[in-house]
Image (cartoon, rainbow, N blue to C red):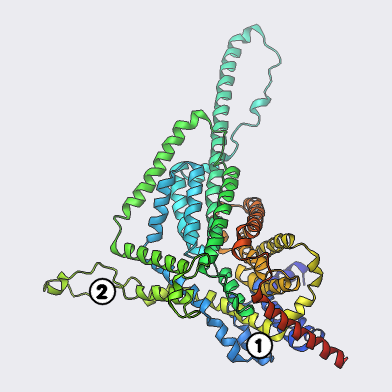
Amino acid sequence: MDPAKFSRKLWCARRELILILVPLLLLPLLFVVPPKEGKCLYVVLLMAVYWCTEALPLAVTAMLPVCLFPTMGILPSKKVCPQYFLETNFLFLSGLVMASAIEEWGLHRRIALKVLKIVGVKPAWLILGMMITSSFLSMWLSNTATTAMMLPIANAILESLFGNLETLKENCKDKRDPEGDSQVKMHVLPFEKQILTTDDRSDWTDRSEQRNLEEVRREAQYQMKVWKGFLICIPYAASIGGTATLTGTAPNLILVGQLKSYFPECDLINFGSWFVFAFPLMLLFLILGWIWIAFLYGGINTRLCISKHDERAAAEAKATAVIDEDYRKLGPIKFAEGSIAFFFIIFAILLFTRDPKFVTGWSVFFTKGYVSDAVTGVIIISILFFFPSQRPSLRWWFDSRASNTPYVPLLSWRKAQECVPWNIILLLGGGFAMAKGCEESGLAVWIGNHLQPLAQVPPAVAVMLITAFIACFTEFASNTATIIIFLPVIAELAIRVKVNPLYFMIPATTGCSYAFMLPVSTPPNSIAFASGHLMVKDMVKTGFVMNILGIMCVSLAVNTWGLHMFDLHMYPDWARPLNVSLATVATHTVSAMNMTG
């Protein structure tokens, strides 16, 4: 068979081959690594390969611990199954339900248009407005939903500013006659004087037309760059904004869940304390990212032609009119929108003030340890399912002519079912089950013994290396799968080098959301790339610098205000008991191996 055809067949059957061959290739681990640790490592690597290659749907791979941990003698099912719906999952679910209610009544669109009305339509400021709006919405909505909503708004504004995209692309092409400048007259005879004069006028007209065409081309190229800047800033801002709240992106919740699994005494990370740390980091990165994108794509530019000022001003006025018209079509704020806004604000305030660590929270009014962020979230979203979407009226009871239609709540369960990505909840559960297996089987200790050489690396340097590695790895794999795989390893590394585990785990969690270089890195990147106006080289060029800026910002945050907030300069008491128990387990394991040897 022709090698080319055979390779194409292999590519078509790649998922099936991975499903069959990877379990066989990993079998030697069961004989090389100590029994229980080897079995757990086998399952972890199998899930890692399946997640990275998507040979199975991510949610299906996440359920493998339910099948493999009990059958391989790693964990009983009564310990595995509860990991799929911990209180962390309820917090995530409450955030998703609140987001679906916001989308149901269009509050997110009103917020977006209002911000754009405030910042104006100058390209640089409009890019900033897009980034602020996208990042704020992605703090509460999913990054994918935010990007999908903001891109049509951006395209409508861009068409008002610059006209039709196809015309713009046509104007970017060089339309000058390649032979026009090569015509040289060698001799001029007396009887040709009149003809020469005519030719000179023609040449002057041609040069003038060429100059005009060149100006049109340069202006079109500038507008095309701005257009790309608009499209690329939205998914980037959505990814950055998701890091600011615990419910903004799944990796943040995986951090909380795995902390509770590995370090039960650690209660430093909750909604309020994470927001105080991550929100300034988000603002810093957002501003630096805006400066870079606006500089690269022409938003910040000193080469503006004065002759084009009037045309640009007219286009900006037209874009302003489009935004004003879209906002006017929304009409006055409806009762349902106002109600959702009220409950959304209450939702955020209660989560933030429950136990923010730097001041006493309202949780002190309840039995210590009983009320968590999950309880707060579920209380608020439960109200949405019975609170009316129309303004209640006492006159209805006494008006016999009023229609007897049943009231409609702010959110129906059918709508919640449609909007909540249940696959992500299963993915979270799979991560928690994997972490539990690593802990119970002793795999974490085994990995830690092999990480001892890294103890020589200074912690500050290790933070940058960990963040950079995670940010690069997540370019090719799901950020949720990435943090599930590496967080247990990073926690064990911190214990081995006697560093506060949060000092390594927080940068890794934040860094796995900084995937900017490839269209496949995140769903928001894929949505923006699918518009057909961006090229891979545009994302690589922009995303490479964005990754560097992100790594620098995370390192700065962890080594400044994060250091004092979470006492990262000290090895905490809540990590010592685990360290002692792990060391004991490791000693027993080594002794047993020596005895059998």
Q: Against 500, is 287 above or below?
A: above
**Quarter of the figure with the C terminus:** bottom right
Can residue 332 be seen here? The reply is yes
Q: Residue at x 41, y 36 (%)?
A: 314
Residue designated by label 1? 68
Q: Residue at x 49, y 31 (%)?
A: 308
Quadrant in the picture for residue 385: bottom left
* Percent x, y of residue 34: 79, 86
The first of marks 1 and 2 along the sequence is: 1
* Percent x, y of residue 384: 35, 72
Disc tally is 2
- Foreground pick, 276 / 435: 276
- Amino acid, disc 1: Leu
Is residue 306 shown left or right of residue 178?
left
**Quarter of the figure with the N terminus:** bottom right
Q: Secondary structure at mark 2?
A: loop
* Crowding near the residue tagged with mark 2, few <14, some 14–19, many ≥20 C-alpha atoms within 10 Å: few
Q: Residue at x 45, y 43 (%)?
A: 121
Q: Secondary structure at mark 1?
A: helix
* Percent x, y of residue 158: 47, 46
Q: Against 19, is 329 above or below?
A: above
Q: CA distance from mark 1 to mark 2?
A: 48 Å
Residue designated by label 2? 407
- Foreground pick, 110 / 219: 110
- Amino acid, disc 2: Tyr
Quadrant in the picture for residue 382: bottom left
* Crowding near the residue tagged with mark 1, few <14, some 14–19, many ≥20 C-alpha atoms within 10 Å: some
